[in-house]
Amino acid sequence: MNISRFIREHKSQWTELEQLLIQLSKRKSRLQASHVNRFTELYKVASAHLATLQTHVPTDETTHYLNHLVSQAHNAMYKENNKSSKQMKEFFLHYFPSLIHARSLFVGFAFFLFLLGGLLGFLSVWNDPLNLSMIMPGTMADSIDPSKTADPRGDLHSPLVSTAIMTNNIRVAVLAFISGVTLGVGTIYLMISNGLIVGALAAVFMQSGKSYVFLAYILPHGIIELTAIFIAGGAGLYMGYRFFVPGPYPRKLRFLESAKESAQLLIGTIPLFIIAGIIEGYITPSTMSLEVKYLIAGVTLLLLGLYYGYGISKRSKQKQFML
């Protein structure tokens, strides 16, 4: 093996990797995504070069140098991955709850719109059951039979159902968020229309004397699921609001900033939808007693409250410390 030739051919790559390592070691330095990709690529190349040198010239100074460089690169990659994990933990534990708190007015308004739609749907079907076919999408009204609600549904107890439900709910949330580009009009429609459906179903089951059963099947997953939808709806409403009320900033800039913040709200709801999908796929169709399902619903509500309270309290303490 011609060691001199090998060094000449690959020295530039090793030098580039060294420079990126120096940049990473600086505390305030932040690499762009393209630089991170290049760093990963150079680390793999240098590792291959090291393997070659260890095979042919294990005691050469270049081998020792490259071994040290690759070790440094490996440690830097580990630190960056660790840093990303910490950032993700910080986002979901503290930043996301504080963002909900900051936009609680819009999340609350989304909840109000849903309640309004629910009340209208309930009154409409309560006064005339035939209105159910006008409210429910497609031919869903024909398949609703309150007398079969409490029947065992073990055949639906599968990961496929959980995945399908979770995907559908995330789609609804994404639509509520994206509808913010319609200046909030589309989001308002989605919140009211979803409320109409739930309200109409509540009226059907109450008229049949099955409201206790109905709520037992809705609440365990519904508390988390609807909370996530209200958050996504609030994100869409906030986008529309900032278009009309940009404050002292240019309208376009303010709208883009609100879109970025709203996207963060949407991202934060993904774990909530995953949990709701698991509950809806496994617990809702199970043969557990109704009382156990109500207990599970209460636990989900309590955990949501604790999560929110913990997140905003920690965030406020961090801000006070920084000040």
Image: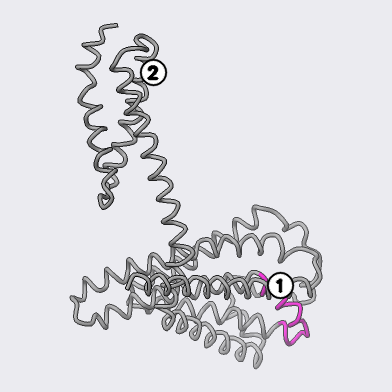
Q: Nearer the viewer, residue 7 or 291?
A: 7
Q: Tell me where residue 222 sits by quadrant.
A: bottom right
Magenta stretch prevailing secondary structure: helix
Q: Is residue 179 left or right of residue 26?
A: right
Q: Which mark is residue 144?
A: none
Which residue is located at x 24 percent, y 80 percent?
A: 246
Residues drawn in magenta: 205-220
Mark 1 neighbour class, 10 Å CA radius: few under 14, some 14 to 19, many 20 or more = many
Which residue is located at x 80 percent, y 66 percent?
A: 288
Q: CA distance from mark 2 to mark 1?
A: 60 Å
Q: Is residue 118 left or right of residue 5?
A: right
Q: Tell me where residue 212 sits by quadrant.
A: bottom right
Q: Nearer the viewer, residue 230 or 101?
A: 101
Residue underneath mark 1? 217
Which residue is located at x 50 percent, y 86 percent?
A: 112
Percent from the top left, x then y, of residue 2?
Answer: 25, 7
Percent from the top left, x then y, of residue 25?
Answer: 29, 43
Which quadrant does the N terminus fall into?
top left
Percent from the top left, x then y, of residue 232?
Answer: 45, 71
Residue underneath mark 2? 51
Q: Amino acid at mark 1?
A: Tyr
Mark 2 neighbour class, 10 Å CA radius: few under 14, some 14 to 19, many 20 or more = some
Q: Amino acid at mark 2?
A: Ala
Instruction: Compare marks 2 and 1 and give the one earlier in the sequence.
Output: 2
